[in-house]
Image: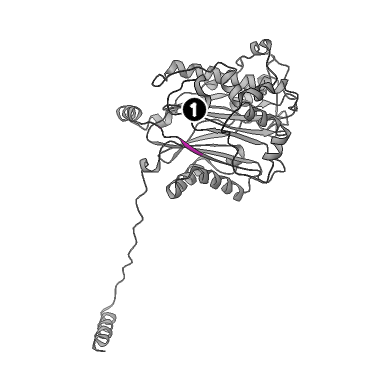
Amino acid sequence: MVAEAEVVCQQSVPVLDVQYFAKGNEIEDVVNISPRRLNQIRVSDSVPADLSTCQVDIKSAEKIPDVSFERAILQFVPSIRSGSFADIGPRRYMEDEHIRIDDLSTQLGSLFKFPKPSAFYGVFDGHGGPEAAAYIRKNAIRLFFEDVNFPQTYEHEVDNIFLEEVENSLRKAFLLADLALADDHSVNSSSGTTAITAFIFGRQLLVANAGDCRAVLCRKGEAIDMSQDHRPVYPSERRRVEELGGYIDDGYLNGVLSVSRALGDWDMKNPIGAPSPLIAEPEFQQVVLTEDDEFLIIGCDGIWDVMSSQHAVSLVRRGLRRHDDPEQCARDLVMEALRRNTFDNLTVIVVCFSTLDNQELSPPRQRRQRCCSLSAEALCSLRNLLDSSANH
């Protein structure tokens, strides 16, 4: 873990993508969670039902007539490709981690059967040291798929039952990962991480978030937030925190933490099994992708502290039309945040759902012709000048 932390603390970290996972040695290095701990994993009773699961984006669905929407769903199949970029920014240490898997079925092998395409992405924004975020990235496949009996399906069988099982599995995975951080002695009790994950199964996009990282969908150039930032000052989070005995001081949970949901941070949480103002339970948003959906941006709060969701979408959209390179777009977003004087580490993933050929290209810019009028005297002088030139 120490060696990995040294790698990500370089001044500029271009790519931290996980391509392959060795299952043998990796799992042996991890402290197993006892059945007693697994039974203690439960959904927080204090989280309102309407906040723990957000369904389809209503605003965007209203803009598409039912007939054309259904036709687009039946015809559209996402073509997944992605790029990422990370940078230490003005901080002394790099505490961000991320994972990027464009072909989840190939990655997991015969263990799971998912519809095509299937993909998995995650951004983990650490604080209080890099240990918590590095642990989650290193053990992501075990935590999110193997230890929670992630549901399996076959092509064309993604339905509401499957999606509900996926949400339940992911909720357990977040809470299980939180407990794993408490048990692992290599992770300091003051180290924690926010976590946002995005899954694609066929046409379904599902985002699970705990913390202030953000996922933003571009639909025909319009930014649609696919997650809610979990800040202590937000009314729903403030109400939950205060009901559980916590307090907000100058925007910080108990005067210490700028987020109200995170994995780890066990020096701020109550003993395992007792309700705590700081929780690891994620919130969900899901949407059916259509041909209007162009790409997804997943970024840590260092991006969103200095730019709006719409500004980020517009920047990436222009970049894709210029060079069609999602990795260059991720880098451009990081550079834009640095130009705007962000004060945090920076990590961005850009996931494209179609090739440039399938997108509506901007019409070519026409040359503007400038017209001017001449007086009769000037026109006469011009004719004399032309006649004189012709005679010579």
Tally of numbered discs: 1
- Is residue 390 depicted above or below 185 in this figure? below
Residue placed at 46% from the left, 22% from the top? 114
Between 277 and 78, the one nearer to me in the picture: 78
| Residue 301 rendering spot, x and y as whole percentages | 61, 37
Instruction: Give the secondary structure at mark 1.
Output: helix
Question: Residue 138: within the magenta?
Answer: no
**Range shown magenta:** 77-82
| Residue 215 rendering spot, x and y as whole percentages | 53, 34
- Is residue 162 depicted above or below 8 in this figure? above
Residue placed at 38% from the left, 21% from the top? 156
Between 76 and 282, the one nearer to me in the picture: 76
Question: Residue 81: within the magenta?
Answer: yes
Dot 1 corresponds to which residue? 106
Residue 272 falls in which quadrant of the image? top right
* Residue 375 seen from this side: yes
Q: Quadrant of the C terminus?
A: bottom left
Kindly identify the amino acid type of the residue bearing the numbered disc 1: Thr
| Residue 173 rendering spot, x and y as whole percentages | 59, 20
* Residue 279 seen from this side: no
